[in-house]
Amino acid sequence: MTGSSQRSTECKISFNVNGHATSLQIHAMERLLDVLRHELGLTGTKEGCGEGECGSCSVLMDGLLVNSCLIPALQANGASIVTIEGLTADSSAKGLQQAFLKCGAAQCGICTPGMILAAFHLLSKKPQPSVDEIREGLAGNLCRCTGYMQIVEAVAEVARSGAAR
Amino acid sequence: MRAQPAEYELVAPGSLPAVLALLAAAPGRWLPIAGGTDVMVQYSAGKLPARKLVSIWNLPELRRIENLADEIQIGAGCTYTDLRECEVINREFGLLSAAAGWTGGIANQNRGTIGGNIVNGSPAADSLPALLVYEAELLLVSVKGERRVHYSSFHTDYRKTQLAPDELIRAICVKKRFSEYYAHARKVGARNAQAISKICLAALGRIAKGVVEDIRLAMGSVATVPLRLSATESVLKGKRIDRALLRLARAAAAAEVRPIDDIRSTARYRAGVTGNLVAEFLERLSAGGTKSE
Protein backbone atom coordinates (compact mmCIF):
# COMPACT_ATOMS: atom_id res chain seq x y z
CA MET A 1 0.00 0.00 0.00
CA THR A 2 1.56 3.26 -1.06
CA GLY A 3 -1.31 5.35 0.19
CA SER A 4 -0.74 7.94 -2.52
CA SER A 5 -3.23 6.38 -4.91
CA GLN A 6 -5.74 5.64 -2.16
CA ARG A 7 -9.20 6.20 -3.54
CA SER A 8 -12.49 6.43 -1.80
CA THR A 9 -14.49 3.22 -2.12
CA GLU A 10 -17.68 5.25 -2.00
CA CYS A 11 -19.69 6.21 -5.03
CA LYS A 12 -23.00 7.78 -5.93
CA ILE A 13 -25.70 5.29 -6.87
CA SER A 14 -28.89 6.42 -8.59
CA PHE A 15 -31.62 3.89 -9.06
CA ASN A 16 -35.35 3.46 -8.91
CA VAL A 17 -36.74 1.60 -5.92
CA ASN A 18 -40.43 0.68 -5.93
CA GLY A 19 -41.18 3.52 -8.32
CA HIS A 20 -39.19 6.19 -6.46
CA ALA A 21 -36.04 7.72 -7.95
CA THR A 22 -33.35 7.32 -5.27
CA SER A 23 -29.74 8.55 -4.98
CA LEU A 24 -27.30 7.44 -2.32
CA GLN A 25 -23.62 7.96 -1.50
CA ILE A 26 -22.48 4.48 -0.47
CA HIS A 27 -19.65 1.97 -0.75
CA ALA A 28 -19.64 0.39 -4.21
CA MET A 29 -19.31 -3.13 -2.72
CA GLU A 30 -22.17 -2.69 -0.24
CA ARG A 31 -24.61 -5.53 -0.90
CA LEU A 32 -27.91 -4.42 -2.43
CA LEU A 33 -29.60 -6.38 0.38
CA ASP A 34 -27.96 -4.16 3.02
CA VAL A 35 -28.68 -0.98 1.06
CA LEU A 36 -32.38 -1.88 0.92
CA ARG A 37 -32.65 -2.86 4.58
CA HIS A 38 -30.30 -0.44 6.29
CA GLU A 39 -30.18 2.65 4.06
CA LEU A 40 -33.77 2.58 2.81
CA GLY A 41 -35.50 0.77 5.69
CA LEU A 42 -37.10 -1.79 3.37
CA THR A 43 -36.91 -4.68 5.82
CA GLY A 44 -39.38 -6.87 3.93
CA THR A 45 -36.36 -8.24 2.05
CA LYS A 46 -34.86 -10.87 4.38
CA GLU A 47 -31.38 -12.24 4.80
CA GLY A 48 -31.23 -16.01 5.08
CA CYS A 49 -27.99 -17.64 3.99
CA GLY A 50 -26.21 -14.60 2.55
CA GLU A 51 -24.70 -16.74 -0.21
CA GLY A 52 -27.35 -17.00 -2.92
CA GLU A 53 -28.70 -20.38 -1.86
CA CYS A 54 -31.97 -19.66 -0.07
CA GLY A 55 -33.80 -16.92 -1.99
CA SER A 56 -34.99 -15.00 1.13
CA CYS A 57 -33.42 -11.82 -0.24
CA SER A 58 -35.08 -12.09 -3.69
CA VAL A 59 -35.98 -8.81 -5.40
CA LEU A 60 -36.75 -7.89 -8.99
CA MET A 61 -34.00 -5.99 -10.79
CA ASP A 62 -35.10 -4.63 -14.17
CA GLY A 63 -37.91 -7.16 -14.04
CA LEU A 64 -35.69 -10.18 -13.33
CA LEU A 65 -35.60 -12.18 -10.12
CA VAL A 66 -32.21 -11.84 -8.38
CA ASN A 67 -30.68 -12.57 -4.99
CA SER A 68 -29.94 -9.12 -3.55
CA CYS A 69 -27.21 -10.55 -1.27
CA LEU A 70 -25.11 -11.21 -4.40
CA ILE A 71 -25.48 -7.77 -6.01
CA PRO A 72 -22.85 -5.12 -5.26
CA ALA A 73 -24.50 -1.70 -4.99
CA LEU A 74 -22.61 -0.28 -7.98
CA GLN A 75 -24.15 -2.92 -10.26
CA ALA A 76 -27.61 -1.66 -9.27
CA ASN A 77 -26.76 1.85 -10.52
CA GLY A 78 -29.38 2.88 -13.08
CA ALA A 79 -31.52 -0.19 -12.37
CA SER A 80 -35.15 -0.44 -11.42
CA ILE A 81 -35.66 -2.45 -8.22
CA VAL A 82 -38.91 -3.87 -6.90
CA THR A 83 -39.03 -5.28 -3.36
CA ILE A 84 -41.96 -6.94 -1.58
CA GLU A 85 -43.04 -3.47 -0.35
CA GLY A 86 -43.31 -2.38 -4.00
CA LEU A 87 -45.89 -5.06 -4.75
CA THR A 88 -48.52 -3.85 -2.27
CA ALA A 89 -50.49 -1.97 -4.92
CA ASP A 90 -50.19 -4.67 -7.58
CA SER A 91 -53.41 -6.62 -8.15
CA SER A 92 -51.73 -9.88 -9.20
CA ALA A 93 -49.48 -9.74 -6.12
CA LYS A 94 -52.63 -9.19 -4.07
CA GLY A 95 -53.98 -12.42 -5.57
CA LEU A 96 -50.80 -14.24 -4.51
CA GLN A 97 -51.08 -12.83 -1.00
CA GLN A 98 -54.69 -14.04 -0.69
CA ALA A 99 -53.80 -17.47 -2.09
CA PHE A 100 -50.88 -17.82 0.36
CA LEU A 101 -53.28 -17.03 3.22
CA LYS A 102 -55.97 -19.39 1.95
CA CYS A 103 -53.59 -22.32 1.34
CA GLY A 104 -51.55 -21.93 4.53
CA ALA A 105 -48.44 -21.17 2.47
CA ALA A 106 -46.85 -18.87 5.08
CA GLN A 107 -45.74 -19.99 8.51
CA CYS A 108 -42.73 -18.31 10.11
CA GLY A 109 -42.66 -15.81 7.26
CA ILE A 110 -38.92 -15.48 6.58
CA CYS A 111 -39.13 -17.07 3.13
CA THR A 112 -42.49 -15.51 2.25
CA PRO A 113 -41.38 -12.21 0.63
CA GLY A 114 -38.89 -14.11 -1.55
CA MET A 115 -41.47 -16.78 -2.38
CA ILE A 116 -44.01 -14.12 -3.42
CA LEU A 117 -41.42 -12.36 -5.60
CA ALA A 118 -40.30 -15.65 -7.21
CA ALA A 119 -43.95 -16.59 -7.85
CA PHE A 120 -44.71 -13.11 -9.19
CA HIS A 121 -41.69 -13.37 -11.54
CA LEU A 122 -42.78 -16.84 -12.70
CA LEU A 123 -46.37 -15.74 -13.37
CA SER A 124 -45.18 -12.66 -15.23
CA LYS A 125 -43.26 -14.93 -17.62
CA LYS A 126 -45.70 -17.86 -17.63
CA PRO A 127 -49.23 -16.93 -16.53
CA GLN A 128 -50.37 -20.57 -16.44
CA PRO A 129 -47.44 -22.67 -15.25
CA SER A 130 -47.69 -26.44 -14.73
CA VAL A 131 -46.91 -27.84 -11.28
CA ASP A 132 -43.43 -28.79 -12.53
CA GLU A 133 -42.89 -25.25 -13.78
CA ILE A 134 -44.02 -23.86 -10.41
CA ARG A 135 -41.56 -26.16 -8.65
CA GLU A 136 -38.77 -25.06 -10.99
CA GLY A 137 -39.67 -21.37 -10.61
CA LEU A 138 -39.53 -21.63 -6.82
CA ALA A 139 -36.59 -24.08 -6.58
CA GLY A 140 -34.21 -21.29 -5.56
CA ASN A 141 -36.35 -20.36 -2.54
CA LEU A 142 -36.02 -22.51 0.55
CA CYS A 143 -38.74 -22.92 3.19
CA ARG A 144 -38.11 -24.84 6.40
CA CYS A 145 -41.71 -24.77 7.65
CA THR A 146 -44.30 -25.72 5.08
CA GLY A 147 -42.77 -28.61 3.17
CA TYR A 148 -43.59 -26.61 0.00
CA MET A 149 -46.90 -28.32 -0.85
CA GLN A 150 -49.03 -25.39 0.31
CA ILE A 151 -46.80 -22.89 -1.48
CA VAL A 152 -47.01 -24.76 -4.79
CA GLU A 153 -50.77 -25.08 -4.27
CA ALA A 154 -51.09 -21.32 -3.62
CA VAL A 155 -49.30 -20.45 -6.87
CA ALA A 156 -51.34 -23.05 -8.78
CA GLU A 157 -54.49 -21.49 -7.32
CA VAL A 158 -53.52 -18.06 -8.66
CA ALA A 159 -52.72 -19.57 -12.07
CA ARG A 160 -56.14 -21.30 -12.12
CA SER A 161 -58.09 -18.21 -11.09
CA GLY A 162 -56.17 -16.20 -13.69
CA ALA A 163 -57.23 -18.76 -16.30
CA ALA A 164 -60.86 -18.54 -15.19
CA ARG A 165 -60.94 -14.77 -15.55
CA MET B 1 -15.92 -12.99 9.37
CA ARG B 2 -18.07 -10.68 7.26
CA ALA B 3 -16.35 -8.46 4.68
CA GLN B 4 -16.15 -4.70 5.22
CA PRO B 5 -17.32 -2.87 2.06
CA ALA B 6 -15.02 0.07 2.83
CA GLU B 7 -12.00 -2.19 2.27
CA TYR B 8 -12.95 -3.00 -1.33
CA GLU B 9 -12.81 -0.92 -4.47
CA LEU B 10 -15.26 -1.64 -7.29
CA VAL B 11 -15.33 0.23 -10.58
CA ALA B 12 -17.53 -0.13 -13.66
CA PRO B 13 -15.81 1.33 -16.75
CA GLY B 14 -18.83 0.36 -18.88
CA SER B 15 -17.14 -0.84 -22.09
CA LEU B 16 -14.88 -3.75 -23.04
CA PRO B 17 -11.95 -1.56 -24.24
CA ALA B 18 -12.03 0.44 -20.98
CA VAL B 19 -12.02 -2.74 -18.87
CA LEU B 20 -9.13 -4.23 -20.92
CA ALA B 21 -7.12 -1.01 -20.55
CA LEU B 22 -7.57 -1.18 -16.78
CA LEU B 23 -6.45 -4.84 -16.69
CA ALA B 24 -3.43 -4.06 -18.91
CA ALA B 25 -2.33 -1.13 -16.72
CA ALA B 26 -2.03 -3.34 -13.63
CA PRO B 27 -2.14 -7.03 -14.64
CA GLY B 28 -3.38 -9.25 -11.85
CA ARG B 29 -4.48 -6.36 -9.60
CA TRP B 30 -8.12 -6.27 -10.71
CA LEU B 31 -10.59 -9.11 -10.29
CA PRO B 32 -13.35 -9.06 -12.92
CA ILE B 33 -16.84 -9.57 -11.48
CA ALA B 34 -19.79 -10.40 -13.75
CA GLY B 35 -23.04 -11.61 -12.13
CA GLY B 36 -21.36 -12.12 -8.76
CA THR B 37 -22.79 -15.58 -8.10
CA ASP B 38 -19.32 -16.88 -7.20
CA VAL B 39 -17.33 -13.73 -6.32
CA MET B 40 -19.97 -12.26 -3.97
CA VAL B 41 -20.25 -15.55 -2.06
CA GLN B 42 -16.52 -15.46 -1.33
CA TYR B 43 -16.72 -11.75 -0.58
CA SER B 44 -19.59 -12.10 1.89
CA ALA B 45 -17.75 -14.83 3.74
CA GLY B 46 -14.72 -12.54 4.05
CA LYS B 47 -12.70 -14.95 1.91
CA LEU B 48 -12.10 -12.83 -1.20
CA PRO B 49 -8.35 -12.11 -1.49
CA ALA B 50 -8.82 -9.41 -4.17
CA ARG B 51 -9.43 -5.86 -2.94
CA LYS B 52 -9.91 -4.20 -6.34
CA LEU B 53 -12.77 -5.36 -8.52
CA VAL B 54 -13.88 -4.34 -11.97
CA SER B 55 -17.46 -4.94 -13.05
CA ILE B 56 -17.95 -6.66 -16.42
CA TRP B 57 -21.66 -7.26 -15.77
CA ASN B 58 -23.84 -6.50 -18.78
CA LEU B 59 -21.04 -5.21 -21.03
CA PRO B 60 -22.80 -5.14 -24.42
CA GLU B 61 -19.73 -6.64 -26.16
CA LEU B 62 -20.01 -9.75 -23.94
CA ARG B 63 -23.77 -10.18 -23.94
CA ARG B 64 -24.41 -11.24 -27.57
CA ILE B 65 -25.00 -14.65 -29.11
CA GLU B 66 -23.88 -14.57 -32.74
CA ASN B 67 -25.29 -17.18 -35.07
CA LEU B 68 -22.72 -17.59 -37.87
CA ALA B 69 -22.89 -19.98 -40.82
CA ASP B 70 -20.83 -22.77 -39.25
CA GLU B 71 -20.71 -21.89 -35.55
CA ILE B 72 -22.30 -19.88 -32.80
CA GLN B 73 -20.30 -17.47 -30.67
CA ILE B 74 -21.74 -17.09 -27.19
CA GLY B 75 -20.65 -13.90 -25.44
CA ALA B 76 -18.93 -14.78 -22.17
CA GLY B 77 -21.25 -12.42 -20.29
CA CYS B 78 -24.40 -14.26 -21.37
CA THR B 79 -26.38 -15.54 -18.42
CA TYR B 80 -27.84 -19.02 -18.04
CA THR B 81 -31.24 -17.45 -18.69
CA ASP B 82 -29.86 -16.01 -21.96
CA LEU B 83 -28.72 -19.53 -22.95
CA ARG B 84 -32.06 -21.11 -22.03
CA GLU B 85 -33.96 -18.52 -24.06
CA CYS B 86 -31.74 -18.81 -27.17
CA GLU B 87 -33.49 -20.72 -29.93
CA VAL B 88 -30.37 -21.93 -31.78
CA ILE B 89 -28.83 -23.24 -28.53
CA ASN B 90 -32.04 -25.09 -27.66
CA ARG B 91 -32.19 -26.57 -31.15
CA GLU B 92 -28.56 -27.51 -31.81
CA PHE B 93 -26.81 -27.57 -28.44
CA GLY B 94 -29.32 -29.26 -26.16
CA LEU B 95 -26.63 -30.32 -23.68
CA LEU B 96 -25.90 -26.65 -22.99
CA SER B 97 -29.54 -25.69 -22.43
CA ALA B 98 -30.03 -28.72 -20.18
CA ALA B 99 -27.01 -27.76 -18.07
CA ALA B 100 -28.11 -24.10 -17.98
CA GLY B 101 -31.43 -25.24 -16.53
CA TRP B 102 -29.67 -27.18 -13.75
CA THR B 103 -27.33 -24.39 -12.74
CA GLY B 104 -28.74 -22.84 -9.55
CA GLY B 105 -32.30 -21.58 -9.27
CA ILE B 106 -33.92 -18.95 -11.48
CA ALA B 107 -32.40 -16.00 -9.59
CA ASN B 108 -28.87 -17.35 -10.06
CA GLN B 109 -29.57 -18.22 -13.71
CA ASN B 110 -30.52 -14.57 -14.20
CA ARG B 111 -27.07 -13.48 -12.97
CA GLY B 112 -24.58 -16.33 -13.42
CA THR B 113 -22.66 -16.16 -16.70
CA ILE B 114 -21.14 -18.87 -18.88
CA GLY B 115 -17.78 -17.06 -18.97
CA GLY B 116 -17.78 -16.67 -15.20
CA ASN B 117 -18.51 -20.36 -14.81
CA ILE B 118 -15.53 -21.23 -17.03
CA VAL B 119 -13.06 -18.87 -15.32
CA ASN B 120 -14.23 -19.90 -11.86
CA GLY B 121 -13.08 -23.35 -13.00
CA SER B 122 -15.02 -25.52 -10.61
CA PRO B 123 -14.68 -29.17 -11.69
CA ALA B 124 -18.30 -29.55 -10.55
CA ALA B 125 -19.78 -26.89 -12.86
CA ASP B 126 -22.68 -28.38 -14.80
CA SER B 127 -22.15 -26.62 -18.14
CA LEU B 128 -18.45 -27.39 -18.61
CA PRO B 129 -18.71 -31.08 -19.68
CA ALA B 130 -21.08 -29.93 -22.46
CA LEU B 131 -18.42 -27.51 -23.74
CA LEU B 132 -15.91 -30.39 -23.76
CA VAL B 133 -18.03 -32.73 -25.89
CA TYR B 134 -18.95 -29.93 -28.31
CA GLU B 135 -15.17 -29.22 -28.58
CA ALA B 136 -15.70 -25.54 -27.83
CA GLU B 137 -13.06 -22.91 -28.51
CA LEU B 138 -12.58 -19.74 -26.51
CA LEU B 139 -11.86 -16.25 -27.81
CA LEU B 140 -9.56 -14.60 -25.28
CA VAL B 141 -9.16 -10.84 -25.58
CA SER B 142 -6.72 -8.26 -24.21
CA VAL B 143 -5.44 -4.86 -25.34
CA LYS B 144 -2.90 -6.77 -27.44
CA GLY B 145 -5.66 -8.44 -29.45
CA GLU B 146 -7.54 -11.69 -29.55
CA ARG B 147 -6.45 -15.34 -29.50
CA ARG B 148 -8.47 -18.49 -30.04
CA VAL B 149 -7.75 -21.50 -27.82
CA HIS B 150 -9.22 -24.98 -27.44
CA TYR B 151 -11.40 -25.18 -24.36
CA SER B 152 -10.12 -28.74 -23.77
CA SER B 153 -6.73 -27.38 -22.68
CA PHE B 154 -8.00 -24.25 -20.89
CA HIS B 155 -8.12 -25.70 -17.37
CA THR B 156 -4.55 -26.58 -16.42
CA ASP B 157 -5.16 -27.77 -12.85
CA TYR B 158 -7.65 -27.36 -10.01
CA ARG B 159 -9.08 -23.85 -10.54
CA LYS B 160 -6.12 -22.87 -12.71
CA THR B 161 -6.55 -21.72 -16.31
CA GLN B 162 -4.62 -20.49 -19.34
CA LEU B 163 -6.15 -17.01 -18.98
CA ALA B 164 -3.43 -14.32 -18.69
CA PRO B 165 -3.92 -11.66 -15.97
CA ASP B 166 -4.74 -8.99 -18.57
CA GLU B 167 -7.20 -11.17 -20.52
CA LEU B 168 -10.93 -11.82 -20.48
CA ILE B 169 -12.90 -14.53 -22.25
CA ARG B 170 -14.86 -12.66 -24.93
CA ALA B 171 -16.81 -15.53 -26.42
CA ILE B 172 -17.28 -19.29 -26.48
CA CYS B 173 -17.44 -20.78 -29.99
CA VAL B 174 -19.18 -24.07 -30.81
CA LYS B 175 -19.35 -25.58 -34.30
CA LYS B 176 -22.75 -26.49 -35.70
CA ARG B 177 -21.92 -30.09 -36.56
CA PHE B 178 -23.68 -32.16 -33.92
CA SER B 179 -27.30 -32.09 -35.04
CA GLU B 180 -27.09 -35.74 -36.19
CA TYR B 181 -25.82 -36.91 -32.81
CA TYR B 182 -27.87 -38.36 -29.99
CA ALA B 183 -27.37 -36.06 -27.00
CA HIS B 184 -27.72 -37.08 -23.38
CA ALA B 185 -27.09 -35.13 -20.19
CA ARG B 186 -27.42 -36.45 -16.67
CA LYS B 187 -26.85 -34.87 -13.28
CA VAL B 188 -26.65 -36.82 -10.05
CA GLY B 189 -27.06 -34.56 -7.02
CA ALA B 190 -29.08 -34.14 -3.84
CA ARG B 191 -31.66 -32.20 -5.88
CA ASN B 192 -31.71 -30.53 -9.29
CA ALA B 193 -31.66 -26.82 -8.48
CA GLN B 194 -29.25 -25.16 -6.09
CA ALA B 195 -27.38 -28.40 -5.47
CA ILE B 196 -23.87 -28.81 -6.75
CA SER B 197 -23.50 -32.09 -8.63
CA LYS B 198 -22.06 -35.17 -7.02
CA ILE B 199 -21.35 -36.09 -10.62
CA CYS B 200 -22.61 -35.06 -14.06
CA LEU B 201 -22.30 -36.37 -17.62
CA ALA B 202 -22.59 -34.79 -21.03
CA ALA B 203 -22.57 -37.25 -23.92
CA LEU B 204 -22.94 -37.30 -27.69
CA GLY B 205 -23.08 -40.39 -29.84
CA ARG B 206 -23.85 -41.70 -33.29
CA ILE B 207 -24.51 -45.31 -34.21
CA ALA B 208 -25.06 -47.19 -37.43
CA LYS B 209 -26.47 -50.75 -37.37
CA GLY B 210 -25.77 -51.04 -33.66
CA VAL B 211 -22.12 -50.05 -34.01
CA VAL B 212 -20.71 -46.93 -32.32
CA GLU B 213 -19.54 -44.62 -35.12
CA ASP B 214 -18.59 -41.76 -32.84
CA ILE B 215 -18.93 -41.10 -29.12
CA ARG B 216 -18.01 -38.16 -26.89
CA LEU B 217 -18.15 -38.34 -23.11
CA ALA B 218 -17.31 -35.68 -20.53
CA MET B 219 -17.96 -35.54 -16.81
CA GLY B 220 -17.97 -33.09 -13.94
CA SER B 221 -16.88 -33.71 -10.32
CA VAL B 222 -14.65 -36.66 -11.18
CA ALA B 223 -11.21 -35.00 -11.37
CA THR B 224 -9.46 -31.68 -10.63
CA VAL B 225 -10.86 -30.30 -13.89
CA PRO B 226 -13.92 -31.10 -16.04
CA LEU B 227 -12.86 -34.33 -17.74
CA ARG B 228 -13.25 -35.70 -21.26
CA LEU B 229 -13.17 -39.51 -21.15
CA SER B 230 -10.97 -39.97 -24.23
CA ALA B 231 -9.64 -43.42 -23.29
CA THR B 232 -13.16 -44.74 -22.73
CA GLU B 233 -14.26 -43.24 -26.04
CA SER B 234 -11.42 -45.10 -27.85
CA VAL B 235 -12.46 -48.38 -26.24
CA LEU B 236 -16.04 -47.93 -27.49
CA LYS B 237 -15.58 -46.54 -30.98
CA GLY B 238 -16.30 -49.01 -33.77
CA LYS B 239 -17.80 -51.59 -31.39
CA ARG B 240 -21.26 -53.13 -31.39
CA ILE B 241 -23.31 -52.18 -28.32
CA ASP B 242 -24.06 -55.37 -26.39
CA ARG B 243 -23.84 -56.57 -22.79
CA ALA B 244 -20.12 -57.26 -23.07
CA LEU B 245 -19.48 -53.73 -24.30
CA LEU B 246 -21.51 -52.27 -21.42
CA ARG B 247 -19.28 -54.16 -18.96
CA LEU B 248 -16.19 -52.92 -20.78
CA ALA B 249 -17.53 -49.35 -20.78
CA ARG B 250 -18.24 -49.40 -17.03
CA ALA B 251 -14.75 -50.62 -16.26
CA ALA B 252 -12.99 -48.24 -18.66
CA ALA B 253 -14.89 -45.18 -17.41
CA ALA B 254 -14.44 -46.04 -13.74
CA ALA B 255 -10.72 -46.50 -14.34
CA GLU B 256 -10.34 -43.23 -16.25
CA VAL B 257 -11.80 -40.84 -13.66
CA ARG B 258 -9.89 -39.51 -10.66
CA PRO B 259 -12.59 -38.61 -8.14
CA ILE B 260 -12.08 -37.59 -4.53
CA ASP B 261 -13.99 -37.86 -1.25
CA ASP B 262 -15.59 -34.53 -0.30
CA ILE B 263 -18.66 -33.13 1.46
CA ARG B 264 -20.95 -34.11 -1.42
CA SER B 265 -19.89 -37.68 -2.07
CA THR B 266 -17.12 -40.28 -2.00
CA ALA B 267 -14.56 -41.30 -4.62
CA ARG B 268 -15.88 -44.87 -4.59
CA TYR B 269 -19.47 -43.79 -5.20
CA ARG B 270 -18.40 -41.42 -7.98
CA ALA B 271 -16.33 -44.06 -9.79
CA GLY B 272 -19.23 -46.52 -9.59
CA VAL B 273 -21.80 -43.99 -10.80
CA THR B 274 -19.47 -42.92 -13.62
CA GLY B 275 -19.62 -46.46 -14.96
CA ASN B 276 -23.39 -46.59 -14.55
CA LEU B 277 -23.96 -43.28 -16.35
CA VAL B 278 -21.79 -44.28 -19.31
CA ALA B 279 -23.57 -47.65 -19.55
CA GLU B 280 -26.96 -45.92 -19.32
CA PHE B 281 -25.99 -43.62 -22.17
CA LEU B 282 -24.91 -46.56 -24.36
CA GLU B 283 -28.20 -48.36 -23.68
CA ARG B 284 -30.18 -45.31 -24.73
CA LEU B 285 -28.00 -44.77 -27.77
CA SER B 286 -28.55 -48.38 -28.75
CA ALA B 287 -32.33 -48.11 -28.17
CA GLY B 288 -32.74 -45.82 -31.12
CA GLY B 289 -30.78 -42.71 -30.31
CA THR B 290 -29.66 -42.01 -33.81
CA LYS B 291 -30.38 -38.32 -33.68
CA SER B 292 -30.06 -35.55 -31.17
CA GLU B 293 -32.99 -35.21 -28.71
Image (tube, helix red, strand yellow):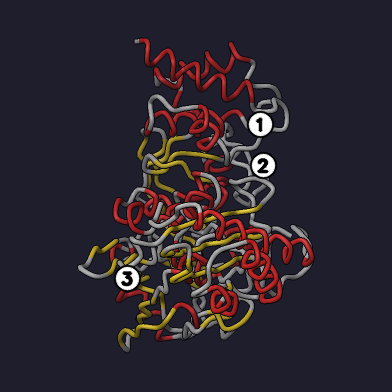
Quarter of the image for the N terminus of chain B: give it.
bottom right
Tell me whether marks 3 and 2 sit on the same chain. no
Mark 2 or 1, nearer chain start: 2
Q: Are marks 2 and 1 in contact (CB under 8 Å)?
A: yes
Side of B263 relative to A131 (left or right): right
What amino acid type should be assigned to the residue bearing mark 2?
Gly
| Residue that mark 2 sits on | A48
Question: How far is the residue under mark 3 from the one under mark 1?
Answer: 46 Å
Q: Is residue A159 above or below residue B77?
A: above
Determine the residue positioned at 50% across, 75% down.
B237
Q: What residue appears at the point 41 percent right and 64 percent down from the top-left corner?
A: B208
Q: Position of residue A155 (x, y in %)?
A: 51, 22
**Residue picked out by circle 3:** B175
- Please say if B199 is above or below B216: above
Give the alpha-carbon distance from disc 2 to disc 1, as whole Å: 8 Å
Give the chain of mark 1.
A
Label 2: state its secondary structure: loop
Residue B188: image location, x then y, percent: 65, 53
The answer to the question of whether label 3 and label 2 lie on touching residues, with beta carbons closer than 8 A, is: no
From this viewpoint, is residue B10 visible? yes
- Return the residue nearer the eye: A83 or A9: A83
Write down the residue under mark 1. A110
Chain letter of disc 3 in the image: B
- Percent position (x, y) of residue B203? 50, 63
Residue that appears at 51% across and 81% down: B29
In the rendered image, residues at marks 3 and 1 fall on the same chain: no
Q: Amino acid at mark 1?
A: Ile
* Horizontal arrangement in the rendering, residue A131 relative to residue A107 (left or right): left
Q: Is A63 placed above or below B39 here?
A: above
Amino acid at pointer 3: Lys
